[in-house]
Amino acid sequence: MALAMDTYSGPVRILDTNGILLTVGSADLERDPERGSWRGLLRVIAGTGVAGKALRVKIEVPGGGVSEAALDPRPETSNGVAFSEIAGIGPAPF
């Protein structure tokens, strides 16, 4: 039996709730045992459709899975990169 990973760091695809690609980015994800879910930090190019918006999306991890999440944008950007906190909804995609 394979053990589930506790963290993931790398590229992700951000899909709307219907599965349509919104953008790509990178994320640092980890399991959140207190909530029985997962959480993380998303980085996308500033000015994309996801940057600066509170959204319910699907996060896809290459070679992993897809899971729903809520994005909570941070107000700051750095060198053209926008950040959002990710709160997982359901099983982790990694």
Image: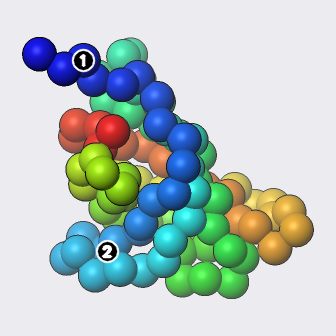
Q: Nearer the viewer, mark 2 or mark 1?
A: 1
**Do labels 2 and 1 touch, CB within 8 Å?**
no
Q: How far separated are the C-alphas under marks 2 and 1?
A: 29 Å
Would residue 3 be visible to someone looking at this image?
A: yes
Q: Amino acid at mark 1?
A: Leu
Taking 60 as reference, is 48 left or right? right
Residue 56 lies, with reference to residue 91, above or below; the image says below
Nearer to the camera, 18 or 3: 3
Q: Earlier in the sequence, mark 2 or mark 1?
A: 1
Nearer to the camera, 81 or 63: 63
Question: Dot 2, crowdedness within 10 Å: few (<14), some or many (≥20)?
Answer: some
Q: Give the secondary structure at mark 1.
A: loop
Q: Give the secondary structure at mark 2.
A: loop
Question: Dot 1, crowdedness within 10 Å: few (<14), some or many (≥20)?
Answer: few
**Which quadrant is home to the N terminus?**
top left
Q: Quadrant of residue 92?
A: top left
Would residue 73 be visible to someone looking at this image?
A: no
Q: Quadrant of residue 48?
A: bottom right
Taking 90 as reference, is 84 left or right? right
* Residue marked by disc 2: 16
**Which quadrant is home to the C terminus?**
top left
Q: Quadrant of residue 20?
A: bottom left
Q: What's the residue at 54%, 49% (across, down)?
A: 10
- Could you tell me residue 11's position as x and y percent? 51, 57
Nearer to the camera, 62 or 88: 62
Q: Amino acid at mark 2?
A: Asp
* Residue marked by disc 1: 3
Q: What's the residue at 88%, 68% (across, down)?
A: 79
- Could you tell me residue 19's position as x and y percent? 23, 75
